[in-house]
């Protein structure tokens, strides 16, 4: 029987994969992909709650819609920053970003 | 095993496996492809949960917009393909242990959730785009103002108690600000003839 | 009239008792029918393209294979593509290279789920019997085709493919914005996103069609059509696959069956966007000239001829034929445009979208809102009738001028006398 916990587990898997991606990718665009995975995991949680608890059937969808729109906006700005970083350092490796170190 | 359960396992398996593949793959273009499958699988999950408008919105905005933007970023920031941006084994271990610990915390907390009251059995359809639009526009009237021809007359407005007009307007202004900001940040800068030499860290070469 | 797809009821009546099996069979049948339709339509369009281009260029086109009009040329082309060598370049990312045509084709094929060919004849059915987000679903799925193009460009290992793919992706993504705004205009007039409901509101005579509803919707139709041509990467917006500059753009390295998949995807997208235009603006499956309604029969063919089954009826079959004919007409107009207009540069493509079409669609959307709010009903009817009448007169005048012009060339007898 597919109940709420199945969907929440799927959301948890996506969230964890996103966090692992954030930690293990050296390419800045790879880090951005991890952020997208995190946001998708959270969105699945919202919509699952909207489906299984009729009190939240509108609120879950509205939250998910806002998350999708804001994620698109954040991806645009993050990519602009990554492009600037690449133009200044000639490398997309985040380990190169160490001018503020120490 | 009903069709709904089979569909759920197929879609959830596709989404989860693609997400794991995003983490494990070495090439960034392949990671973008696996991310495409993850996002498409998530859209399928939304359709399965009855949120049709959200599923279509996910495909339109995420797959058709954000992912295309990410791939453009990948193309514009290519470097020497012989450079292998990999991390060491120790860092992989730390990453995996932390992620699995996080997964454990999440699973334990969701196992302790109570079953929500009057949870429906089987598939059901969530409120359609008309009600979402009414909520976003702040319309809390009990019945629509004018009847529409050719459309089924369902009880759309019975449950609307709150509206989300202010967040909707804030989101619009936010998107405008982001549009201008991203365009400004990513503009082509004029190269000055007497430009400063590059910083010392990149002048040292590739390997630290 | 229920909009539930009649196949599910048919299979249930034949006694498939395992839960879900009737739905699975109905879904499989719909999928097979749609793939077959897309493949046959692509075959027909390839032949039609060659004939239309030939006639515009004052030559004959295929005339050998299959008699005088060469109708079997497409079949010969298909056999040739099947038996071609399967090439994958050494520098290409093999797995992504093989995946790209299927991603592009899926983006087109899945969009046909929401396209109703007649009342109740769509591949999707839900508990309520309507697909509440028909147009939005089609636009959303058609926008995933961009990724197939990008994958093809990136993974070919060829810089012309990469440039072509990136230009293509930028063009397709940019043109989605004015396209969606123009789609909003008839959705606003109808009050629903469901394509079947929008078409049912345009039944009756052809001045009920939304394209003749007010001047703003008229402009919206032409703007939508331009954006649709651009998003299908057809000329004059096909710089990204311009043969004189980029060899063949993103599908340079593709040959044989993989190329055929890209072309099925392109012709499928052309049919899908024409289908959206037909439903939203041109009355969908309604004939527009219900002369039989003057004698008391219902205007809608499906209501007039509802046998043998309310959904799988003769009236619906005729409606599906009318709808397909209208879509083929729009696709022929796209082909006509391709072989008449010169190609425009990539910066002109982007400026046409962002500087011209996007403000036009915003103005049109605001205009329709204001029209609905402030124009009194009697004036609306006058405008609708005069738009319909004016457009009919224009089309008839163009047709008369085209087909009755006397020949300007010397007669055969004069030629013999000169010689």
Image (cartoon, rainbow, N blue to C red):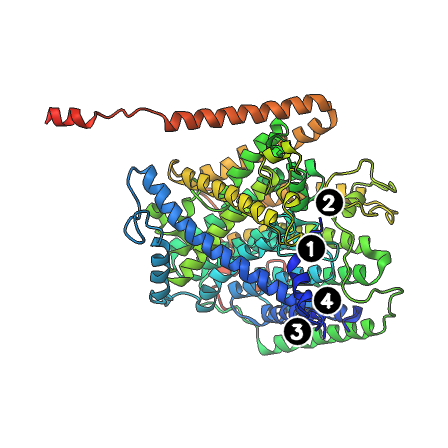
To the question of a shared chain for discs 3 and 2, the answer is yes
Coordinates of residue B66 in the picture (x, y in percent): 60, 53
Q: Is residue C52 left or right of residue B136?
A: left
- Mark carried by residue B95: 3
Mark 3, mark 2: which one is toward the viewer?
Answer: 2
Camera-side mark, 1 or 3: 1
Q: Classify 10 Å Cα crowding around label 4: few (below 14), some (14-19), many (20 and above).
A: many
Same chain for mark 1 and mark 4? The answer is no
Mark carried by residue C4: 1
The circle drawn on residue C345 is none
Q: Residues within 10 Å of mark 1 (few under 14, many from 20)?
A: many
Judge by depth and name the residue closer to the eye, C321 or B197. Answer: C321
Q: Position of residue C148 (x, y in %)?
A: 50, 57
Q: Tag 4's secondary structure?
A: helix
Q: Earlier in the sequence, mark 3 or mark 2?
A: 3
Circle 3: is it few (<14), some (14-19), or many (20+) Cα within 10 Å?
some
> Does residue C147 appear to the left or right of A72 in the view shown?
left
Report the Cα–Cα distance between label 1 and label 3. 51 Å
Q: Are marks 3 and 4 in contact (CB under 8 Å)?
A: no
Spatial CA span between label 3 and label 2: 34 Å
Residue located at (79% from left, 56% from top): A60
From the image, tell me which residue sits under label 4: A11
Query: Which quadrant, please, contains the N terminus of chain B?
Result: bottom right
Tell which subunit mark 2 falls on: B
Figure quadrant of residue C340: top left
- Which of the labelled discs sits on residue B171, or is there none? 2
């Amino acid at each position: 029987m597919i109940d709420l916990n199945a969907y929440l587990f799927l959301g948890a898997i996506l969230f964890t994969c996103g966090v692992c991606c954030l930690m293990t990718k050296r390419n800045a665009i790879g880090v951005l992909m991890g952020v997208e995975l995190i946001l998708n995991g959270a969105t699945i949680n919202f919509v699952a709650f909207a489906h299984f608890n009729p009190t939240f059937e509108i609120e879950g969808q509205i939250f998910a819609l806002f998350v999708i729109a804001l994620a698109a906006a954040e991806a645009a700005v993050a990519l602009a920053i990554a492009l600037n970083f690449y133009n200044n350092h000639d490398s997309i490796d985040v380990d190169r970003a160490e001018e503020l170190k120490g | 095993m009903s069709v709904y359960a089979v569909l759920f396992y197929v879609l959830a398996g596709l989404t989860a496996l693609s997400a794991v593949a995003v983490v494990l793959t070495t090439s960034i273009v392949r990671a973008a492809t696996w991310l495409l499958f993850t996002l498409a699988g998530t859209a399928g999950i939304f359709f399965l949960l009855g949120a049709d408008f959200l599923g279509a919105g996910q495909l339109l905005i995420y797959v058709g917009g954000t992912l295309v933007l990410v791939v453009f970023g990948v193309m514009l920031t290519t470097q020497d393909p012989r450079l292998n941006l990999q991390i060491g084994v120790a860092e992989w271990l730390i990453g995996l242990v932390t992620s699995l610990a996080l997964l454990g915390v999440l699973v334990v907390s969701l196992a302790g959730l109570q079953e929500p009251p009057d949870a429906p059995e089987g598939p059901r359809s969530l409120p359609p785009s008309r009600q979402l639009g009414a909520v976003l526009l702040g319309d809390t009237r009990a019945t629509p103002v004018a009847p529409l021809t050719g459309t089924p007359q369902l009880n759309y407005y019975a449950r609307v108690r709150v509206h989300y007009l202010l967040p909707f307007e804030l989101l619009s202004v936010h998107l405008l600000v982001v549009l201008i900001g991203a365009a400004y940040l990513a503009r082509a800068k004029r190269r000055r003839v007497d430009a400063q030499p590059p910083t010392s860290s990149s002048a040292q070469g590739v390997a630290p | 009239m229920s909009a539930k797809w009649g196949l599910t009821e048919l299979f249930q009546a034949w006694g498939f008792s395992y839960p879900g099996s009737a739905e699975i069979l109905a879904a499989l049948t719909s999928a097979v029918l749609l793939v077959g339709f897309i493949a046959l339509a692509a075959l027909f369009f390839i032949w039609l393209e060659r004939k239309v281009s030939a006639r515009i260029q004052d030559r004959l086109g295929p005339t050998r294979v299959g008699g005088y009009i060469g109708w079997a040329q497409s079949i010969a082309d298909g056999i040739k593509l099947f038996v071609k060598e399967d090439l994958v370049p050494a520098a290409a990312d093999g797995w992504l290279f093989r995946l790209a045509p299927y991603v592009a084709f899926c983006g087109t094929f899945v969009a046909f789920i929401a396209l109703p060919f007649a009342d109740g004849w769509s591949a999707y059915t839900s508990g309520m019997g309507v697909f509440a987000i028909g147009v939005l679903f089609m636009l959303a799925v058609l926008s995933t085709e961009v990724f197939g193009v990008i994958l093809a460009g990136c993974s070919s290992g060829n810089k012309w493919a990469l440039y072509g793919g990136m230009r293509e992706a930028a063009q397709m993504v940019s043109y989605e914005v004015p396209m969606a705004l123009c789609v909003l205009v008839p959705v606003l007039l109808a009050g629903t996103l469901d394509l079947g409901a929008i078409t049912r509101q345009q039944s009756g005579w052809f001045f009920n069609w939304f394209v003749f509803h007010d001047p703003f919707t008229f402009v919206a139709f032409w703007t939508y059509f331009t954006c649709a041509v651009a998003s299908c990467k057809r000329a004059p917006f096909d710089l990204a696959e311009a043969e004189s500059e980029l060899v063949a753009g993103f599908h340079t390295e593709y040959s044989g069956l993989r190329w055929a998949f890209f072309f099925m995807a392109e012709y499928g997208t052309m049919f899908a966007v024409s289908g959206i235009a037909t439903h939203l603006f041109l009355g969908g499956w309604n004939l527009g000239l219900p002369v039989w309604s003057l004698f008391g029969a219902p205007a809608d063919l499906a209501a007039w001829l509802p046998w043998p089954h309310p959904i799988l009826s003769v009236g619906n079959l005729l409606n599906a034929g009318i709808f397909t004919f209208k879509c083929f007409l729009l696709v022929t107009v796209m082909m006509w445009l391709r072989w008449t207009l010169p190609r425009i540069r990539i910066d002109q493509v982007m400026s046409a979208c962002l500087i011209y079409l996007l403000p036009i669609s915003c103005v049109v959307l605001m205009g329709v809102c204001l029209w609905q709010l402030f124009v009194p009903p009697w004036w609306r009817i006058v405008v609708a009738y005069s738009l319909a009448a004016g457009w009919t007169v224009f089309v008839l005048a163009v047709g008369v001028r085209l087909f009755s012009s006397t020949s300007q060339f010397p007669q055969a007898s004069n030629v013999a006398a000169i010689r």
